[in-house]
Image (cartoon, rainbow, N blue to C red):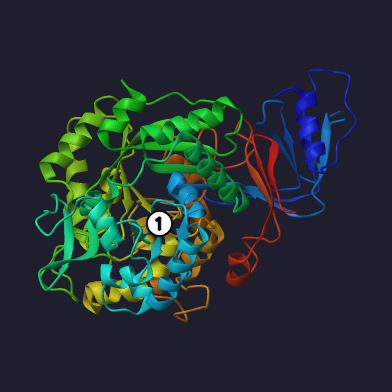
Amino acid sequence: MNRLVRAMTLVVAGLSIATFGADPLKADSLIENVNGMTMTKQGTVQRFNAMLIDDDGRVKQLLNRRDKRPKQVDFQFDGKGQTLIPGFVDAHGHVMGLGFGALTLDLSDTNSLAEALAAIKAYAEQYPNRQWILGGGWNQEKWGLGRFPTAAELDAAIPDRPVWLERVDGHAGWANSAAMKAASFSTKSKAPLGGEIIKIDGKPSGIFVDKASTLIASAIPVPRPIERDLALAKAQEILLANGVTTIADMGTTMQDWQSFRRAGDKGQLNIRIISYAAEIDNMIAIGGPGPSPWLYNDRLKLAGVKLYLDGALGSRGAWLKQPYADKPDTEGLALLTLAQLKNKMSRAAMDGFQVAVHAIGDRANAETLSAIEEMQGTFSGDRRWRVEHAQIVTPSDIARFAKTGAIASMQPVHQTSDRLMAENRLGPNRLIGAYAWRSILDSGGRLAFGTDVPVESSDPFAGFAAAITREDASGQPFAGWMPEERLSREQAWKGYSIDAAYAAFAEDRIGSLEPGKQADFLIVDGDLMLDTPSVVRNQKVLQTWVGGRPVFVNK
């Protein structure tokens, strides 16, 4: 970046600027007087007091107090003793889902059906001209409802406009009668393979699980490009404020990719997005013969494809080896046949795309690992097969992650959010192997941590605290849930940094602060290694820098 442009950027951000040097070859920035910390490849913490950044926005040198400072730099930032850490790498999220969720009705804070219905009615009154009422975040388990909500209950709040609300995990939707009518849905409509229409007394209830959601969602007006770009801008704003500088976007559509490219072309792509295409058709449409190169100075890359083998535990779509404890007539949903799964994995792998498979239930995880074992006989080399979520794993299958080199891409906050629900779904005797972070590491496996935003908050500090305590924000359950699966602080941080980058073949440029890597870092108000878990959970991001320039400043 041109030195004058960079200096002007820093002036606008209210940061201190040093005097310009006369030598154009010394176009460096000095970040001085910080409590600097970064992870090493060995999983240890390296501390430093200053960092030199070159004119390309990459780390040039880490300095300690005894190291001589350069005599001449373009500008200098005084950290005033505050803590500096690498930006978080979110190994699993949904960028456009975050953006659209922030611009539509969010029910994630509702604690009862009555609260949700009141919020829906108020939202409809606030936006009388919107053709559809759209949103999500509801969770019948959090409401203590003991069942799914119904179309009739939604009709009582909004009878005259279509309403479609996705469950918090994105694996079920709630429709009112007007939405079903708009979608030409009738009692004769059948659920597609991998989907379920929840019924009451033989009649559709208004709840559509996994692929059955398309019966309603396909009738929703398609967002215009300007609306997509607005959603992307909102998503970036939220992620950067939470300290996420890179995110693996799990399920990129061609329309999403076009929004990312428009932002990149305009110089408005401030986070780094590593895309995994939503299914094979989008993979081919976006990447063609293979993964894309890094674009916009390492801001965007299509790395691979995201496939879904099962649904979610909360909607009983996770594919289990045995029936659900609280619904013995089902073992969940397989969204693909095993032949389809292996065919899709082969199609992606033969052109060099990385494969990420969504697997939550123990059978889904076992079948995914079996498919990877079979693929290894055909596709050699460093493939870094990914298993997204890996929430419920039979203990005997845990060692298979290390044996296959498969990466367990997990989200720590799911454990604290899902704890009681998982106990109900599985029963107490089937919980060993659930959210088994420590067991996977101890068996030689590798973890990559993310948030699964917008299913959960995009705040990685909450995930870090959950990983080291197995407790939620209120400290429950005391001493943790299955506490033997807790991680050390170093292990948790590695999952959100170096190993999250490794999971996307990006460890050569992001994930830590070391010479040659991108200068993506945060100024925060605490110390990950020293503060209590409750303090860590509530740490604030004061500034976020990407590529050596500030992109978020907490006013």
Quarter the C terminus occupies: bottom right
Q: Position of residue 34 (x, y in %)?
A: 76, 50
x and y percentages locating residue 473 in the rendered image = 52, 73
Identify which amino acid the numbered label 1 is placed on: Ile
Judging depth in this view, the residue of 335 and 379 nearest the camera is 335
Q: Is residue 64 above or below residue 289?
A: below
Residue at left 45%, top 62%? 124
Residue farthest to the bottom, as pictured: 478
Q: Circle 1 sits on which residue?
A: 133
Give the camera-side residue of 268 and 534: 268
Residue drawn at 47 percent across, 57 percent down:
128
Q: Is residue 69 visible?
A: no
The N terminus appears in which quarter of the rendering? top right
Q: Position of residue 353 (x, y in %)?
A: 32, 30
Residue 471: image location, x then y, percent: 47, 73
Residue 47: tell me if it is visible. Answer: yes
Picture quadrant where residue 71 is located: top right
The foreground one among 353 and 498 is 353
Task: Give left or right: position of 520 versus 138.
Answer: right
Which one is nearer the viewer's eye here, 210 or 199?
Answer: 199
* Residue drawn at 52 percent across, 28 percent down: 262
- Above or below, 23 against 381 in this view is above
7 lies above or below 400: above
Secondary structure, mark 1, is: strand
